[in-house]
Image (spheres, coloured by chain):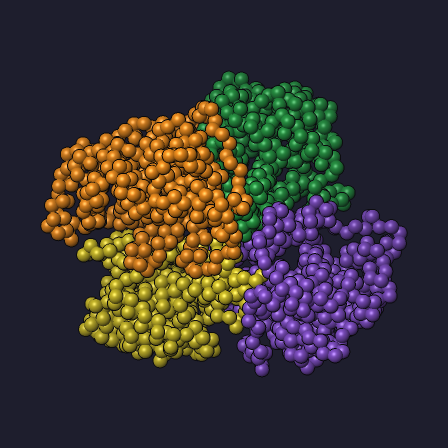
Chain colours: A yellow, B green, C purple, D orange
Amino acid sequence: MLVDGEGKRVRYDASEDQQLLRETTRRFLEARSPVSEVRRLLEDPVGFDPRVWREGAELGWASMFVPEAFGGMAESASGAMDAALVAEELGRVVFAGPFLPTNVVAFAVAEAGTEAQRQRVLPALAGGELVATWCFAGTGLSPGTRPVGVRATTAGHGFVLTGDSGYVQDAHVADLFLVTAATETGLSQFLLPAATEGISVTPLDALDLGRRLSDVRFDAVAVDGTSVVGAVDGAADHVERQLQLALVLQCAETVGVVDRVLEITVEYAKDRVAFGRPIGSFQALKHRFADHAMWLEAAKAVTDHAAAAVQLGAVDAAIATSLAKSHVGRSATEITRDCVQIHGGIGVTWEHDLHLYVRRAVSNEALWGTPAAHHERLCDLAGV
Amino acid sequence: MLVDGEGKRVRYDASEDQQLLRETTRRFLEARSPVSEVRRLLEDPVGFDPRVWREGAELGWASMFVPEAFGGMAESASGAMDAALVAEELGRVVFAGPFLPTNVVAFAVAEAGTEAQRQRVLPALAGGELVATWCFAGTGLSPGTRPVGVRATTAGHGFVLTGDSGYVQDAHVADLFLVTAATETGLSQFLLPAATEGISVTPLDALDLGRRLSDVRFDAVAVDGTSVVGAVDGAADHVERQLQLALVLQCAETVGVVDRVLEITVEYAKDRVAFGRPIGSFQALKHRFADHAMWLEAAKAVTDHAAAAVQLGAVDAAIATSLAKSHVGRSATEITRDCVQIHGGIGVTWEHDLHLYVRRAVSNEALWGTPAAHHERLCDLAGV
Amino acid sequence: MTTNVDDKTEHVDTDEERAFRLRARRYLSSAGLPPRVPNEPVYQWDDDGFVARDRSIQRALWDGGFAGITLPVEYGGRGLPDRFDTIFVEEARPYRMPWAFGVNRNVIIPPMLAHGSEALKRRFIPPMLRGDHIWCQLLSEPSGGSDLAGLLTRATRDGDVWLLNGSKIWTTGGNHADYGACLARTDPDVPKHAGLTMFVVDMKQAGMTVVPLRLADRSAHFCQEYLDDVVVPADDVLGEVNDGWRVATTMLMYERAAIGRGWDYGKERAARAAEHLSLSTTVVDVVRRAGLASDPHVRQLLGEMWVLEALMQLTPPRVAAGMASGALSGHAAAIVKLMSGKVGARRTALLSELAGPLGVAAPPDGDVPFAVREAGLERVTLHNIGGGTGEMQANTIAERLLGLPREPSPDRELPFNQLAHNAAPPAPRAQPPQDR
Amino acid sequence: MTTNVDDKTEHVDTDEERAFRLRARRYLSSAGLPPRVPNEPVYQWDDDGFVARDRSIQRALWDGGFAGITLPVEYGGRGLPDRFDTIFVEEARPYRMPWAFGVNRNVIIPPMLAHGSEALKRRFIPPMLRGDHIWCQLLSEPSGGSDLAGLLTRATRDGDVWLLNGSKIWTTGGNHADYGACLARTDPDVPKHAGLTMFVVDMKQAGMTVVPLRLADRSAHFCQEYLDDVVVPADDVLGEVNDGWRVATTMLMYERAAIGRGWDYGKERAARAAEHLSLSTTVVDVVRRAGLASDPHVRQLLGEMWVLEALMQLTPPRVAAGMASGALSGHAAAIVKLMSGKVGARRTALLSELAGPLGVAAPPDGDVPFAVREAGLERVTLHNIGGGTGEMQANTIAERLLGLPREPSPDRELPFNQLAHNAAPPAPRAQPPQDR
């Protein structure tokens, strides 16, 4: 549990404002983007519904890190904590849309962008008119916790970007890429239009049916100095905070996935009869449910803590997010898989929504660093 | 399942001879060395009952690798498989006595010893009059799967042994040490009287209350050429086979421990009443028992396979023993711990025998290489 | 590094057996049978070629005199002792055997021999042996899960025929089958086990709608059936009316044994055990190519995976030997089934950890091995088919092998129509789903 | 790298509260109290010094006017609102508080206030506050396990007194206690919950034999009692005769809350949560000294251990806040208890893997850290004390929090003497065991 500046403890279910935000978001999603949307959008070239995304933006989904001067509400929002709350609701419907990447880019530009970048980008991001994404991880088996794919070398007044970035969400339709690249003595970040010469996008076969991921190749992409976000060679701290935010949003989304799957499965176990009584009355099943409820509660605790730590810029925010990712990532896969098992055969049919949830849980476990990659990161952070 | 030279399949519960051996051993142990012996011998300086050990030797416990010419019955026994069978029975009573080290040394001397060594040592080992032990593993955190503690350098016609060997069973009372040492270009083995100048024994605080372990220090111990067992620099293959035998006996003993603990606990669950019915009728408990029975069956399968592989000198004997150790070691600890849990509070009292069993299971998991050390060894064996 | 073990039992043949063996060897080598392909993928809903090929293989066995080797001659068999079947299985190992006729061989014919009327046996067994009829099992229901005896499909008598209404699910080859053995409720006023009957159902009739059951990985090797006044002549009952539970129990026992032994002319599983304990090379390969072979954590995962593979290789033959020797009861088969679920789950977790992000998203044409590409999907879809299976196996082990007392449960004594049960399944869809 | 958080609530004090706080601070600093030692080991059977010290600390609190802060003045308390207790707890944090009086404070006095007669409260509460009487709980029985209401200890009326016979177990401080709250069966002819009575028992009488309960790690902080015609005056009943289950339920509820809050004047657990999420330094130290800090497998173990520690640090305060806000029911405390068992078990497994062979055998005077030396022993002895506790917590979570239906169970309705139960425990041993 965290104590904010005023000594007020972070409460179990957040402030009244946050409760309102949760309810509004849930009602909107139930009406406009239930889990059946995933099936409807399976063959859709975009992979999400841009109208729904813009309507969500009107509800403030992309405004939480954008200052009021640029059409956002950063000053009145509790950034990471509010965004986590929305992400949790999105997880409950396996939402298809650029929530995580857009918010992380908005956060990055708001924190470190030039005035010109902020004016050009932030209002359109907040309004849901622009989609942005972040090129951070490497491709293939690279760990997902470090930017290892792209290098930028100076060329005249500008830079040339070369390399590959992996698992980039919604890169196939994004208008803007925020690219983290290694430069001479550190990390630098660049904000590029997707149409920049030399960028190519290869969509991946993704397990998660509600999310499009791509590898992005930078083939000697020439950019000028105006595309730099923050200090050349000095972006490491910002990159770290962006990663923390991405982890918080991912964990919160996963918590939503598990919360909903457990709800569905508990209901099923109450209704479904075998041997003359509800299967939920059998003790062995109860004990599995009890374990799941317990680990989910822990997942919420560790995610809330991480969100608050990131929001407050706490010294242990990096640790908190990696701890959260490890537990949330692993437990989500285990719990949702056992919920499939509890459903019996019906749980593995294409018609049933369960697999859509499990796919997201398994995918989230592996992206932005597997639990194993975060254990490594934790040891690094602890100086072990 | 393995096929022996005559195409006869190794049967589920062994041959008639082996069934007889099992029954004889069990009856003897019930009468002469029930688990209560562990308590009686707690403060005993020897730590086991030499009379019981000699009586066991009369039943053939130390004869299985000793040729008939030296008072044993190697020719008529199925070495590793028979010894494993006895070890399993010993596990069922948490037997205190030098079964494993004595047999491994007898095996080593029978296989590689000089005629003089065999004549001097084997009849007395087979008769239970001499106790021998094997200095193999290093001390402390060293992995237990490799001889890393002792070096021998040539000095005139003999050698000088220097270093430390760890976790040596019954070293405090052994008459003979078989020492595996690194020499110039390989491994060599030496058979020494315990009283040899320069050897010191430090008993360890051991978790297993039925087994004494010591570190053994070799402080420039001078030995002559007659103490060498097998080829100088060429003992690696023999050392490997000794390790395999030790692992088979350890796994079999652990299987006996688990088998007995599960028996005790199933009986308890049938008798013990809560909420008006036997606790064993509660489904959550049943499912835990089912898991335990399943992993125990797998432990028996993998141990039987390892014993047969070692007995036949199969090419995959090294792999088979490491696979066995990993599964048997881990599952034994998990199963016996949960059996304690099923017993409720009574299971953690000093008065109850359960902890004597769990101590042996946990101790066996860690000695002769932890499961993790054997995973490493498996990768080495597979050339990964 | 493979122990080359030929586990044929040729050395104990009598002269007569030896003659049979040589005849089988000769015939098999000249019959133009396709070779056995290890781990051939399961056939899909629309794979008619697979079924046609198996019909012709079964026909070839019949033509050679090797169909129904141990079955009575009056039903088209050869009337030989079991030993001859073993010999044939040993000789047939290099060839593809008719997988699609596994249901006939393993789960239909044995209970038919045990419980069927003389007329039924003479009418139905020969066409199965000739390769003409494929059968399916119609047992599980969408409303049923693991409580088979609580099934809802009703059979009502209408003059000379029975009319069956309800739905069946998880049927292998339902769309290819000519006949089905269908368990239905004939008397709801008695306890659930006492009011069931096993019918012989002609699958090719108007009231029987068979649709593919598409799974979460988009595969469809099972079917679902909707029965809408399906007509069964009064004589086409396997066993007695209201004695269907006994027939079903026999059927399930033979099914269990066959799964343990290997589905298509057996021994595949047992044969594996004689092989060397080797770690799956695909995985090692991936690890090597990723440059992770010396990473101690990766080596732990590999080690553990190897252990799991060994357990699944060594335990089934041990359990089978235990059952054969009488040291273990037939219920011990549950150990193997439960283990395969547990080991499978852990294995997918290890594979996912090795595959990392590549297991959840990979380039469509990239050089990513199947095992890695599918690692994530396997975590989603791995399941003990049939619903609640793991739970049932665990109960069996605890109650039948360890002797733990059963739970008090009223559902074994009360009349079926006084028990709570699930709603009947919805009507059939007009169209099979069009998902790719 | 520690976030220095002072989580005192001084900033919201009223003037009156502020004055109380300063008075407490002053008194505590001058009363000669020993400092609080984090993770002080639990006291053992024969540790009389521990108890004597706690009696004198409790006496000091009484002398300063800080015993029973929120209790009614007529029972020796100060009659102040809860807020004052919170203030005192905040100020007392640097000092050792009387752990041995935790039973009085947490589990005896609250149900006594709720259910006790006026006479009982006036007679017994003041001596507890003065440090004169230590109480213990006599609930669990050797024959009982998790089924508390099925207990066997009998109370029979004999003129003006009750005579109690039976045995109790898992008693903290039974040998030091002056009085015990003892649940016994007064009517076996009614269902089990309806025939119990909570007695006030004088522990220092001939019929009460208290022996140490030595655990597998040779420690002995619990006791077992044998009751042989223990005499209780008819008036010394807490609550009504045959209404003891209600009293016990209240007692257990307060006990659960106290365990969640921290036993000795609270907050220890909550305070921990405000601290930085740091990995146990002992373990890191061991790993560094062994030269294993860069081994990726060891780093995985460390990472996972850190995660477990974080879960145990962050979950209890969240659950407590949920219960305080009403978002979670009081049964949610079961989550924390269940988790501490599961996390503990996994933690010992990780520790054992890190400790390797050193965890099962170490040189007596070697330079081996405690955590490593004890790794193996912890695997043997770690247990949710009380028997079946984990199972009960899991049932509570499933039934009370998730709303899953209860199992049919006759034991709640049938008269106690028609239920199966365990045999009575054996008679007391003549001598306490002499094991070291």
Nearer-the-camera pick, D70 or D393 = D70
The location of residue D246, given as percent across then percent down, is 38, 48
Image quadrant holding the C terminus of chain A, namely top left
* Residue placed furthest toward the right: C15
Q: At 20% from the left edge and 36% from the top edge, which residue is drawn?
A: D62
Q: Is residue C250 left or right of residue A250?
A: right
Dividing the picture into quadrants, the one containing residue D369 is top left
**Residue at the location (52% across, 62% down)?**
A278
Residue at x-position 44% and y-position 77%: A41
| Residue D129 location (% of width, % of height) | 24, 37
Q: Is residue B9 visible?
A: yes
Q: Is residue A104 above or below residue B259?
A: below
User: Is residue D19 rendered to the left or right of residue C396?
Assistant: left
Instruction: Please tell me which residue is depicted at 64% across the width and 36% down the height of the picture.
Output: B84
Q: Quadrant of residue C188?
A: bottom right
Tell me if residue B283 comes above or below residue D32 in the rendering: below
Q: Residue furthest front?
A: D159
Q: Is residue D374 visible?
A: no
Question: Is residue A229 positioned above or below B352 on the image?
Answer: below
Q: Is residue D177 left or right of residue C224?
A: left
Q: Nearer the viewer, residue A247 or B258?
A: B258
Nearer to me, B354 or A255: B354
